[in-house]
Image (spheres, rainbow, N blue to C red):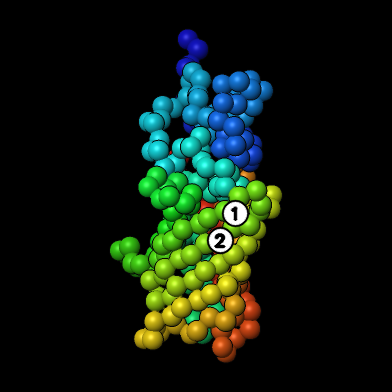
């Protein structure tokens, strides 16, 4: 008796799938050459594939506004349990876990992505927060320009601007606010990079300088996409 094939997970096989589906959702039904490579983004999977529930509207690539098409590759949840590495002259080296969430705003008048980040200490038995961020990411229509504003748990508020190129984004710090009793040193410069490595992995690097130290790599981590998947 021939054994039944093991069910496979529905997935994309091309890094461009998110952009294609966001830009032209009907390609999922009309482009038969694209479909085999973008079954996850199109939410169309054949036989012998693990079932998945309908995704939440805020993660549906087909509903991406035009000004956010260039950011479609970010939409979803990304996580690394142990892969984060942090270093700076004022702190000991340590590892951390982190989860990022990028979702479409369904209530805002201006098209934006909701953004959140939660990092935790791997040396603790319980999930202990190290750093968290919440904010919005917007795209300038018909250009590669992107802006992000965030509120951070360490008492900082930032505005970052940058460009998207080949499914990577490089932000530079434009403005920063800081509560008076924050323990962290004032940041002078900051560069944040997000790079899509393949269909399911996203790399993040953050360089910064303070009043007392030059520009250095502060954090580095590679996430795996955990939703939708």
Q: Residues within 10 Å of mark 2 (few under 14, many from 20)?
A: some
Q: Residues within 10 Å of mark 1 (few under 14, many from 20)?
A: some
Query: Furthest residue to the left?
Result: 126
| Left or right of residue 152, residue 225 in this image | right
Q: Quadrant of residue 35?
A: top right
Across and down, in percent, residue 132 comes to 40, 66
43 versus 169 height, above or below: above
For label 2, the residue is: 147
Query: Furthest residue to the right?
Result: 166
Query: Furthest residue to the top?
Result: 1
Q: CA distance from mark 2 to mark 1?
A: 8 Å
Q: Residue at x 59, y 58 (%)?
A: 146
221 versus 187 height, above or below: above
Of residues 142 and 104, the one drawn nearer to the viewer in this rendering: 142
The residue tagged with tag 2: helix, strand or loop?
A: strand
Across and down, in percent, residue 24 comes to 59, 32
Nearer to us: label 2 or label 1: 1
Can residue 44 be seen by looking at this rendering? yes
Of residues 211 and 37, the one drawn nearer to the viewer in this rendering: 211
Residues marked 2 and 1 touching at CB (< 8 Å): yes
For label 1, the residue is: 140
The residue tagged with tag 1: helix, strand or loop?
A: loop
Q: Residue at x 63, y 79 (%)?
A: 215
Across and down, in percent, residue 40 comes to 52, 32
Can residue 36 be seen by looking at this rendering? no
57 versus 148 height, above or below: above
Across and down, in percent, residue 23 comes to 60, 37
The label on residue 25 is none
Q: Residue at x 56, y 67 (%)?
A: 160
């Amino acid at each position: 008796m021939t054994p039944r094939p093991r069910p496979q997970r529905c997935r994309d096989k091309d890094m461009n799938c998110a952009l294609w589906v966001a830009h032209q959702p009907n390609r999922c039904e009309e482009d038969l050459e694209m479909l085999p490579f973008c079954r996850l983004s199109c939410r169309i999977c054949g036989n012998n594939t693990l079932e998945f529930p309908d995704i939440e509207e805020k993660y549906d690539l087909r509903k991406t506004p035009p000004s956010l098409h260039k950011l479609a590759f970010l939409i979803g949840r990304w996580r690394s349990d142990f892969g984060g590495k942090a270093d700076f002259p004022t702190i000991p080296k340590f590892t951390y876990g982190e989860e990022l969430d990028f979702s479409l705003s369904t209530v805002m008048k201006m098209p934006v992505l909701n953004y959140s980040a939660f990092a935790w200490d791997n040396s603790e038995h319980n999930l202990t927060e190290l750093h968290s961020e919440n904010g919005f990411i917007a795209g300038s229509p018909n250009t590669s320009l992107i802006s992000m504003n965030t509120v951070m748990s360490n008492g900082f508020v930032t505005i970052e601007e940058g460009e998207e190129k080949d499914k990577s984004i490089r932000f530079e710090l434009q403005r920063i606010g800081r509560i008076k009793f924050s323990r962290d040193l004032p940041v002078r410069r900051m560069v944040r990079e997000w790079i899509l490595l393949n269909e399911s992995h996203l790399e993040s690097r953050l360089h910064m300088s303070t009043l007392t130290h030059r520009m250095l790599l502060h954090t580095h981590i590679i996430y795996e996409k955990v939703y939708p998947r």
